Image (cartoon, rainbow, N blue to C red):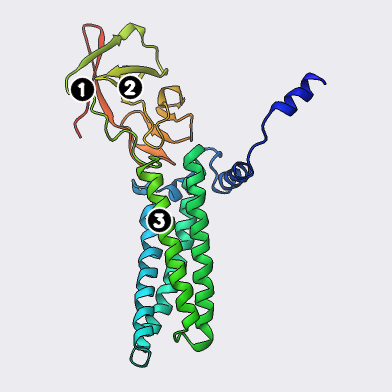
Amino acid sequence: MSTSENEAVSTPRQPALERFSDGLQHAIQAVIGARSKPPRLFRSLLNGTLLGHPLHPAITDIPVGAWVLAAIFDIIWLIAPAFSAWAAQGAFVTVIVGLIGAVLAAVTGLADWSDTYGGERRVGLYHAGLNVLAVVLYLVSFLLRLPEGARENVAAAILGFLGLIAVLAAAYFGGDLVFVKGTNINHTAWEAGNEEYEAVMPLDEVAENKLYRVMVGGVPVVLLRQGLQLYAISATCSHAGGPLDEGTLTGDVVECPWHGSRFCMRDGRVLTGPATVAAPRYDVRVRNEQIEIKRRES
């Protein structure tokens, strides 16, 4: 048996779920322009960069809230159908609102999920699958209500209850992504830095337009010199913790090597998603030919 045949036999085949996730992520990244040239406005819009806050969790409140109301209206109608035609109408409207919100939540959620990997990617897929199930159930529920002019339908109500169970189960996995896996949290939130200036390196060792990684109060900071100006921001990408000092520098903008988030070195502003939170900024001064840095007060 040849070496190549041995390698083919010994190389484990990627699980079907992983192959599916790879293909889906590549497709999503192509659609949202994740690998296109900056500024990648469509991707930044979906991520919430323009708002300074992740967009997906804000939108998910719409379908969850609407469908909880739909369940309440359905229960009212089932208890007293003769006196609650208004409840049937309310359920019909809130099911529609939930479906519209679910579409928006799915688009933004898939954009966020396209940057995940490993365990968080699998949990995100379970989260998405349950939400798809919920949408299908509510869509059928909506269609069953139509022939009667938005009046109540017992089968439609039952499907709505099942849909609510599915979306609440999906919300559980969504919470696991954030609170257990740390997906889309601000990875610089707990950086304390140093309130006093700390010498990091001699000025004459710092070349222009080159990124340097230094430590300030135990926190990694990326340093840049341009002419007489010195800039410093956190070296940790707020999106997923990527090392900005290993990123690409264009003018005074650094691009994270992991997912392409772009930050302005002058003030830490995030210019391109998937990051939504600005990088902490550090004050820089030169004293006795030594560069000194401290964390800027918020």
Q: Residues within 10 Å of mark 1 (few under 14, many from 20)?
A: some
Residue 213 position in % (x across, y down): 37, 18
What residue sits right under mark 3 in the picture? Answer: 171
What SS does tag 1 mark? loop
Residue type indicated by callout 3: Ala
What residue sits right under mark 2 in the picture? Answer: 220
Tell me which label, 3 or 1, sits earlier in the chain.
3
Residue type indicated by callout 2: Pro
For the point 50% across and 51% down, the residue is 126
Label 1 and label 2: CA atoms lie apart by 11 Å
For the point 41% across and 45% down, the residue is 177
Residue 208 position in % (x across, y down): 40, 15
Label 3 and label 2: CA atoms lie apart by 34 Å
What SS does tag 2 mark? strand
Residue type indicated by callout 1: Asn
Q: Is 62 above or below relative to 200?
A: below
What residue sits right under mark 1 in the picture? Answer: 194
Q: Residues within 10 Å of mark 3 (few under 14, many from 20)?
A: some
Residue 73 picture quarter: bottom left
Q: Nearer the viewer, residue 98 or 250?
A: 98
Q: Is residue 267 shown left or right of residue 98?
A: left
Residue 274 picture quarter: top left
* Quadrant including the N terminus: top right
For the point 48% across and 35% down, the residue is 260
Residue 93 position in % (x across, y down): 41, 77
